[in-house]
Image (cartoon, rainbow, N blue to C red):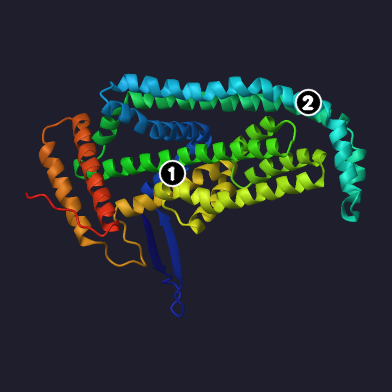
Amino acid sequence: MMRTKKSNDARSPHARKRVLRIEIAPATMVIGVLVLCVAWLLVRLLPVLLVLVAALMIAGTLNPAVEWLESRHIRRRSGIAIVFGLLLLVIVLPLILTIPTLVDQVASLVAHEPELRARAAGFLSRYPLTASLSDYLRDFHYDALIKSFGIQMLAFSTRIIEILAYSAGAVFLALYIMIDRDRLRGALFAVVPRSHHIRLSRIMTNLQTIVGGYLRGQIVTCLLMGIFLYILLQACGVPNALAFAVFGGIADVLPFIGVFLTMIPAVLAALAKGPVITLVVFAALLVYEELESRFLIPLVYGHALRLPSSVVLFSLIVGGSLYGIAGALLALPLAATILMLIDELRVELPGEQAGNPDLKEEDKRNEAEYERRTAGMAAEEAAAVAVEITDHRKKEETDSGQHAKHGSHPERPHP
């Protein structure tokens, strides 16, 4: 690696100088170059990696439904077709039902924009602090905005088409991953030593739980936001309630900025109904956002991700700072995955004492049983056995946890 040489100056009898030479071994230089090349390649392939991550998340979310159909004696491929058909129906049907109404309501917003702007300016002019804003709103012209919008529209539409193409690619990749599950899992198990297959199977099972719980949580919170916003605006008589509800439900998926994208358009639309309705809409959305962040999100994500609130907030900040919205969206499952790996790999942190010896002994027994049962098996067949052992152990842990919660002790079967 790095070698140090000391040489003395023999020509000076009174003073000897020490020269420190640092030499980097060729192997270290090669490793450093390879690391830089891999890092550069990962940065260049970041969109592809995000598509792969999205595909794995979709597969992890839909796989429990496919397994449930398999338990009802439906063939796996038929179950996959049913699940993806329902997914396509869930995506397309709301679009068919809402897009015509959404387009009409957006057109109505554009047609009534001068009137809405005049009302908003009149409302702002009543108060000294916002009087200057009312003048700016009355004198605002759209000419420069339209020109700028026309120039940027082409680039924006290209970006939208690119995102849609990546999204479609992620869905199809998830479909192929689920169809080729056994072969892909066998290939993964083939490159991992057999003594670690049980841990690998346990990690994959926990990853599926984390990813599925996170995506299902996102769907639930977005639907609840859209439904609440639609009911609120309809009850207050705010026009174009469906358009704002659909937009608010989609925007709710975005961390940090989702609350502003949801509240600001709805509150501005409520200005046309007067200050009382505006205050009611603002207060109701503020209360709901607080309820969602304090109650709904911990309730929906807590069981699957098992993250404290401080870790959730810190993960969102770090993910958003590094990779923007995409980083913030992936921050929670990534943080939960890191904590799960520390727990499953029995990593002993510096501030903790030695791990539970009973768990380590149980790991050794499970690995020994697995190696005995899979002697001479191919990797694909051995992977199925590892999953079976992992599912059995997870069921035992769940049952023991439920018994401990209710204060009873499960009866242990006789060997």
Horizontal side, residue 191 vs residue 80: left or right: left
x, y percent for residue 46? 51, 36
Horizontal side, residue 71 vs residue 300: left or right: left
* Residue that protrudes farthest toward the bottom in the picture: 14
Kind of residue at badge 2: Ser
Kind of residue at badge 1: Val
Residue contact at pointers 1 and 2, CB within 8 angstroms? no
Regarding mark 2 in the picture, which secondary structure is present there?
Answer: helix
Residue at which label 1 appears: 35
Q: Is residue 197 visible?
A: no
x, y percent for residue 131? 91, 50
- Crowding around mark 2 (Cα neighbors within 10 Å: few <14, some 14 to 19, many 20+) is few
Residue at which label 2 appears: 108
N-term mark: 1 or 2 = 1
Q: Nearer the viewer, residue 92 or 358?
A: 92
Q: Residue at x 19, y 53 (%)?
A: 410
x, y percent for residue 299? 47, 49
Horizontal side, residue 122 vs residue 300: left or right: right
- Measure the C-alpha gap from mark 1 to mark 2: 56 Å
Q: Establish if 232 lies above or below 105.
A: below
Q: Residue at x 39, y 62 (%)?
A: 4
- Crowding around mark 1 (Cα neighbors within 10 Å: few <14, some 14 to 19, many 20+) is few
- Residue 340, labelled with which disc? none
Q: Establish if 327 lies above or below 15.
A: above
